Image: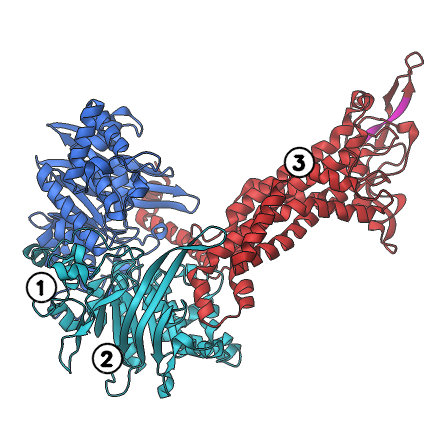
Chain colours: A red, B cyan, C blue
């Protein structure tokens, strides 16, 4: 017996009425959403549409965490990424435990076992052994070594997100000189993750400017710009990047090298944007609402900034998001080849360069972990870009 | 009908208007052909009147309309516009400053209300845009007052002015477009197929609104560009039929539909589908052979002769001029060699 | 709607086709029934969102990916044998045989029915060979014959043209030729004249009328233009938001309309006759089909809205005079459920 018939029997309540009430409630919900929709701006619509893209939302969340970690790298990482600890060189990642099989007890607070370095007297092979009797509980918000947040003088401190009181904690293992890989990856993300963002920012401005000029004014200027873009696009990317980065003077300070690497990476990036922007300008110039605004007396600036740009920059941003991975990969590739940033700079590419040696790969495969982070970041950017692209034109199915 | 002022000089007087588009090819933009979209069109519109420009696609009716507001620059000809009863100025040659002023007095309305309203602006922003740009209002609150009364004028709820266009149906959007067009208090409205993108049942809402507004705002003048003859007959005082860039017939609506003088007009009237099964089945439909001539390569003589069932030799060789065969009270212009001799069928 | 008789070539019963998307379920067709008599023209008219094109797609089983026919019957009668098209698989060989051979379709935009990389001749010949099993030479001769019969100038030359080389009117003719190449029992024409000018429209309508008389096929003419219906149709089905609201002969619909929507539609169109000077719009606009009103879908716009009835229950279809069916509470009829 269905709920409705039961109810009818009990109360002599017309089932029809229940249904109608339910419909009314549903309709009210729809109406409320609908009312919001009626006064929703373009960005709100994009947000709603993007929010329905689960994978993109998850990726955006992940990227958010990664960027936060990059900003507060000193706080998040338990150690100074540059401090050598020879006694812990090539220590493997430690396992985080809650359950101690030795004691047969469960601990609410996670812990790791202490590790000690052992040298095989015959083969001189270095191994690390867990001391099952000595637990090191992981403490949060501990005092560690002194640091300066983002190298800003008055932001000094020694508070770290987590750490252990004695011995070491190495979540992702140590490198050949005993530097903590996790701390290095977190610090490395500062360069690796910002190269792409800065790169697309430059691509965006150059691309919108040149593409806009080309599309809005047309004529001979358009023809020349288009030929130049074709010429640039015809140059193979990696050799061009290599040639340009080899040309950077070796004695330059790190920050300058960094900005030039970004510039080199965006030398190709803007051309794609310029093409898109030009195409959009060309089609928008004949769009009725633009003509209407022109006849209203709107100035060229007003036409461009109030009517034309807003109708496609969401689309351009979505497209650019999809180009971030290429830039991250570009930086990684250049640094890996030793042509981009060099140690002591820390980036994922520089770290991977350390893992080039076969001995390292055989004995410390975890040193390839920066590659995993490159992979995750790139996938996340791709998913976010996909989501943005789908959401960029919120008027497509309303 | 509307308040037509026949005594004074016309509001708009178009003389020999031409618009040629050049087809170019290659990097150096070599001219490979000329499309005569508008080819020597002359007409005038009295204040308070509705003139319809009718024809099939590619006949130049839209381009003519666009030339009148200089959305398209004419290649030749003059468009004399009597601005506030001052001496007429020639729209075809005015400078930038005058053009700005002129475009407050002459407004253009588009066919598709889905593409003519910026989806990223609210209705208030859309309608107030011409007011703010031209500094016709001092501040936001004055703008809101004006937009409110404009929305009331087009029978839309002013409380909805902060909504975006996607919240409105096609018919409502077209009314928003009308409100925007009327915002700077124009005297002349060019309506380019204002109802052909709308659902049948709401077309009449927009048509009747345009009619009512003409009555309310005494002296509002329309150029009504359309292809649907029933709508034109309902809406306009006079009708100009265009064929391949030229006007072939121009007269008062009644007269044109009852006693057409050009074979093309006759065929158009005959071909128009009418929701009246008995009448439709009784009449013998004239089905024109072939298709509209290519304006890049028009035929010799009368452009219509390859499709005309009354064509004679002279039609193939000599182009008929547009001439008046009507009376002084009721001019009837037609471009056909045999306008007086032919007895053509109109509506019943 | 309408009683079933022996001379029905196609009858549709309680057809429901829905579209499923994140916004919800769109009931594009929600319980539609009609019959098509052999050799007659049925006009289906309605505004945007009324489901007239989806009807054609449902019959031929060519709904877009997110659409699904959830219930109903589409019975095709051929030589005494009745087939329910909805019982066939969407890609089954049987439905493929029926498409083109038994039921052909022409569209608003002729380019959609031609592949741009083949000549129109190739495509017509292929259709003929597929359905009629002729040799290549015979099929070509037959194709030229058909092109000639649809008034294509120089058929033996145009047969080797690519679709984009033809003018709009010629493409329309080529598409009709392809549709008619296998002598279909039923021709479905979906807004065939919406994209063309009046003089070309007159040509196309004339051609459809001629070919219909010549081949004796039944035609479903789908359009928003009541003028086209008045000119061509024997029977008319008026649709509103996925439902048939009125069905009758063309005289019944145009001269004695019963449903307030039909009346409103007819009153809202300017007519060409002498002295016709008043048009009366229907108030409001077609609602969003995702959020169709309860009860009679037309009630928010209806001038004869009856509080307490129209917004509550769906009106039943009643026969107000022989062959004239209306779904409106004004004419009695009990709750359909």
Position of residue A52 measured from the top left corner of the image (x, y, whole percent): 52, 45
Kindly give the residue lying farthest to the top in the view shown.
A122
Magenta residues, as a range? A112-117
CB under 8 Å between discs 2 and 3: no
Instruction: Tell me the residue that label 3 is attached to.
Output: A376
Q: Is residue A124 above or below residue B168?
A: above
Position of residue B278 measured from the top left corner of the image (x, y, whole percent): 7, 57
Mark 1 is surrounded, within 10 Å at the Cα level, by few (under 14), some (14 to 19) or many (20 or more) other residues, namely some
CB under 8 Å between discs 1 and 2: no
Q: What element carries label 3?
A: helix
Q: Is mark 1 on a helix, strand or loop?
A: loop
Q: Which of marks 1 and 2 is in front?
A: 1
Q: What is the CA distance from the residue labelled 1 to the residue labelled 2? A: 28 Å
Left or right: where A102 falls relative to C84? right
Instruction: Tell me the residue that label 2 is attached to.
Output: B2
* Mark linked to residue B345: 1
Which quadrant of the rendered structure holds the N terminus of chain B? Answer: bottom left
Mark 1 chain: B
Which quadrant of the rendered structure holds the C terminus of chain B? Answer: bottom left
> Nearer the N terminus, badge 1 or badge 2?
2
Q: Which quadrant holds residue C61?
A: top left
Mark 3 is surrounded, within 10 Å at the Cα level, by few (under 14), some (14 to 19) or many (20 or more) other residues, namely some
Q: Nearer the viewer, mark 2 or mark 3?
A: 2
Residue B154 appears in the picture as rendered: no
Q: Nearer the viewer, mark 3 or mark 1?
A: 1
Seen at 35% across and 66% down, the residue is B19
Mark 2 chain: B
Left or right: where B112 falls relative to A69? left
Position of residue C308 measured from the top left corner of the image (x, y, whole percent): 25, 59
Q: Is residue A18 magenta?
A: no
Q: Which quadrant holds residue B72?
A: bottom left
Question: Total number of numbered labels?
Answer: 3
């Amino acid at each position: 017996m269905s709920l409705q018939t039961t109810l009818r029997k009990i109360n002599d309540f017309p089932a029809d009425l229940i249904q109608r009430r339910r419909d009314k409630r549903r309709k009210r919900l729809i109406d409320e959403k609908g009312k919001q929709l009626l006064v929703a701006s373009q960005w709100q619509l994009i947000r709603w549409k993007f929010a329905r893209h689960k994978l993109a939302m998850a990726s955006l969340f992940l990227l958010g965490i990664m960027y936060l970690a990059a900003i507060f790298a000193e706080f998040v990482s338990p150690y100074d990424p540059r401090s050598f600890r020879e006694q812990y060189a090539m220590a493997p990642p430690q396992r985080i435990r809650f359950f101690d099989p030795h004691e047969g007890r469960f601990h609410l607070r996670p812990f790791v076992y202490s590790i000690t370095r052992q040298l095989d007297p015959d083969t001189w092979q270095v191994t690390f052994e867990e001391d099952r009797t000595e637990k090191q509980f992981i403490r949060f918000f501990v005092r560690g070594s002194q640091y300066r947040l983002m190298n800003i003088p008055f932001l000094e401190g020694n508070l770290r997100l987590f750490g252990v009181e004695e011995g070491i904690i190495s979540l992702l293992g140590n490198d050949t000189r005993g530097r903590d890989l996790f701390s290095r990856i977190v610090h490395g993300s500062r360069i690796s993750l910002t190269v792409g963002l800065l790169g697309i920012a430059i691509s965006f401005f150059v691309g919108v400017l040149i593409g806009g000029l080309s599309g809005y004014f047309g004529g001979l200027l358009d023809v020349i710009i288009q030929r130049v873009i074709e010429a640039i696009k015809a140059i193979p990317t990696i050799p061009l990047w290599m040639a340009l980065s080899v040309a950077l003077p070796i004695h330059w300070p790190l920050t300058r090298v960094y900005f030039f690497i970004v510039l080199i990476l965006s030398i190709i990036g803007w051309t794609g944007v310029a093409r898109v922007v030009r195409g959009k300008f060309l089609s928008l110039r004949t769009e009725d609402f633009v003509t209407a605004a022109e006849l209203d007396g709107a100035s060229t600036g007003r036409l461009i900034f109030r009517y034309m740009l807003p109708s496609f920059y969401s689309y351009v941003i979505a497209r650019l998001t999809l180009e971030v991975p290429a830039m991250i990969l570009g930086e990684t590739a250049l640094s890996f080849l030793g042509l981009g940033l060099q140690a002591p700079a820390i980036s994922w590419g520089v770290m991977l360069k350390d893992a080039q040696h076969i001995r390292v790969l055989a004995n410390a495969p975890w040193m390839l972990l920066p590659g995993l982070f490159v992979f995750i970041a790139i996938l996340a950017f791709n998913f976010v870009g996909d989501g943005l692209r789908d959401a960029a034109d919120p008027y497509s199915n309303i | 009908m509307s308040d037509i002022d026949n005594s004074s000089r016309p509001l708009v007087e178009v003389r020999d208007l031409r618009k040629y588009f050049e087809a170019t090819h290659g990097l150096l933009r070599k001219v490979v052909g000329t499309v005569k979209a508008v080819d020597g069109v002359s007409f005038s519109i009295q204040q308070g009147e509705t003139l319809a420009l009718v024809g099939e696609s590619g006949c130049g009716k839209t381009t003519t309309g666009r030339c009148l507001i200089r959305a398209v620059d004419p290649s030749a000809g003059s468009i004399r516009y009597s601005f506030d009863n001052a001496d007429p100025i020639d729209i075809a040659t005015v400078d930038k400053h005058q053009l700005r002023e002129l475009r407050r007095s002459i407004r253009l309305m588009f066919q598709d209300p889905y593409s003519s309203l910026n989806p990223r602006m609210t209705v208030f922003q859309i309608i107030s845009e011409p007011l703010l740009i031209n500094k016709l209002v001092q501040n936001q609150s004055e703008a809101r007052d004006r937009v409110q009364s404009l929305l009331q004028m087009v029978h839309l709820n002013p409380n909805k002015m902060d909504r975006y266009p996607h919240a409105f149906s096609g018919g409502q959007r077209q009314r928003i477009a009308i409100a925007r067009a009327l915002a700077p208090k124009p005297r002349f409205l060019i309506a380019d197929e204002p109802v052909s993108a709308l659902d049948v049942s709401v077309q009449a809402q927009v048509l009747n609104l345009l009619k009512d507004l003409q009555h309310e705002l005494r002296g509002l003048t329309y150029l009504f560009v359309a292809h649907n003859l029933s709508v034109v007959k309902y809406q306009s005082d006079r009708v100009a039929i265009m064929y391949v860039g030229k006007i072939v017939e121009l007269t008062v609506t009644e007269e044109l539909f009852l006693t057409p003088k050009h074979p093309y007009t006759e065929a158009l009237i005959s071909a128009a589908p009418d929701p009246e099964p008995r009448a439709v089945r009784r009449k013998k439909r004239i089905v024109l052979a072939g298709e509209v001539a290519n304006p890049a390569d028009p035929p010799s003589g009368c452009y219509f002769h390859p499709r005309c069932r009354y064509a004679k030799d002279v039609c193939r060789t000599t182009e008929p001029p547009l001439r008046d065969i009507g009376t002084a009270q009721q001019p009837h212009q037609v471009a056909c060699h045999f306008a007086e001799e032919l007895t053509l069928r109109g509506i019943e | 709607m309408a009683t079933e008789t022996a001379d029905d070539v196609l009858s549709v019963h309680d057809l429901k086709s829905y579209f499923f998307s994140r916004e919800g379920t769109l009931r594009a067709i929600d319980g539609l029934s009609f019959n098509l008599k052999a050799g007659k023209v049925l006009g289906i008219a309605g505004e945007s969102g009324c489901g007239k094109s989806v009807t054609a797609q449902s019959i031929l089983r060519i709904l877009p990916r997110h659409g699904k026919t959830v219930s109903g019957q589409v019975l095709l009668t051929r030589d005494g044998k009745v087939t329910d098209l909805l019982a066939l698989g969407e890609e089954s060989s049987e439905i493929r045989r029926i498409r083109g051979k038994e039921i052909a379709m022409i569209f608003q935009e002729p380019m959609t029915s031609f592949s741009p990389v083949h000549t129109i001749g190739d495509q017509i010949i292929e259709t003929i060979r597929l359905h009629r099993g002729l040799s290549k030479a015979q099929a070509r001769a037959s194709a030229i014959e058909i092109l000639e019969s649809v008034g294509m100038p120089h058929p033996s030359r145009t047969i080797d043209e690519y679709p984009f080389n033809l003018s709009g009117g010629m493409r329309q003719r080529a598409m009709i030729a392809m549709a008619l190449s296998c002598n279909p029992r039923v021709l479905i024409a979906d807004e065939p004249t919406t994209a063309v000018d009046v003089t070309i429209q007159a040509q196309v309508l004339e051609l459809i009328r001629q070919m219909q008389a010549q081949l004796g096929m039944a035609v479903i003419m789908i359009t928003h233009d009541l003028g086209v219906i008045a000119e061509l149709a024997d029977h008319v089905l008026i649709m509103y938001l996925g439902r048939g609201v009125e069905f009758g002969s063309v005289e019944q619909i145009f001269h004695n309309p019963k449903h307030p929507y039909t009346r409103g539609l007819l009153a809202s169109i300017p007519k060409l006759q002498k002295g016709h000077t008043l048009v009366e719009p229907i108030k409001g606009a077609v609602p969003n089909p995702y959020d169709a009103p309860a009860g009679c879908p037309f009630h928010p716009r209806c001038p004869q809205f009856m509080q307490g009835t129209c917004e509550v229950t769906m009106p039943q279809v009643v026969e107000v005079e022989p062959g004239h069916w209306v779904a409106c509470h004004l004419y009695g009829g009990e709750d359909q459920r």
